[in-house]
Amino acid sequence: MNSHTNQPSREEIARCAYELWQESGGVHGHDREHWLRAEALLRGGEVVRFDVVLLPAGDPVTAARAVRDATGLDLATVKALVDAAPGPIVRGVDGDEAERLSTRLNAAGVAIEVVETAG
């Protein structure tokens, strides 16, 4: 911690983010999430995460297109998610990402639910 501001240093945040990355299995592509979670943990704040859950309603083809466009997931994964509805499309995202997905999917007519999960 910086003694002047009582804030974690960039090195401390980076070290914690690396540990979180290792705990998650070393999956690339979530650097920002690990950094934000590390920063919140070091500041003593609670990390709030959300699951975006696809509900079984509407046309499955429309749902699959919208989910694929919003998430960038491959077609086989999207098809499995749509077939398994209700179920999470994404897990443990921050509030901004959950809101972004919710807005895009609702605009496409896809029924979803955003559920707060343990950080």
Image: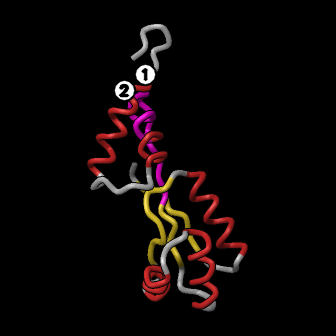
Extreme residue toward the top, this view: 4
Q: Position of residue 41 (x, y in %)?
A: 39, 34
Question: Relative to 103, is 74 on the left or the right?
Answer: left
Residue at 48%, 71% (x, y): give it.
89
Question: Relative to 31, is 100 on the left or the right?
Answer: right
Q: Position of residue 99 (x, y in %)?
A: 63, 58
Compared with residue 84, is residue 28 higher up or lower down, i.e. above or below?
Answer: above
Do callouts 1 and 2 mark residues in contact (Cβ within 8 Å)?
yes
Q: How many marks?
A: 2
Residue at 57%, 90% (x, y): give it.
60
Q: Label 2: which residue?
A: 12
Q: Position of residue 28 (x, y in %)?
A: 39, 55
Residue at 53%, 85% (x, y): give it.
56
Is-magenta flag for residue 57?
A: no
How far apart marks 1 and 2 lie (CA) works out to: 5 Å
Q: Quadrant of the N terminus?
A: top left
Question: Relative to 86, is 98 on the left or the right?
Answer: right
Secondary structure at badge 2 equals helix
Extreme residue toward the right, this view: 107
Identify the magenta region. Answer: 37-50
Amino acid found under the numbered disc labelled 2: Glu
Is-magenta flag for residue 38?
A: yes
Compared with residue 18, is residue 54 higher up or lower down, i.e. above or below?
Answer: below
Q: How is the image coloured?
A: secondary structure
Residue at 57%, 76% (x, y): give it.
67
Label 1: few (<14), some (14–19) or many (≥20) C-alpha neighbours in 10 Å: some
In front of the other: 77 or 98: 77
Label 2: few (<14), some (14–19) or many (≥20) C-alpha neighbours in 10 Å: some
Q: Label 1: which residue?
A: 9
Q: Position of residue 12 (x, y in %)?
A: 36, 26
Residue 87, disc: none
Question: Relative to 91, is 72 on the left or the right?
Answer: right
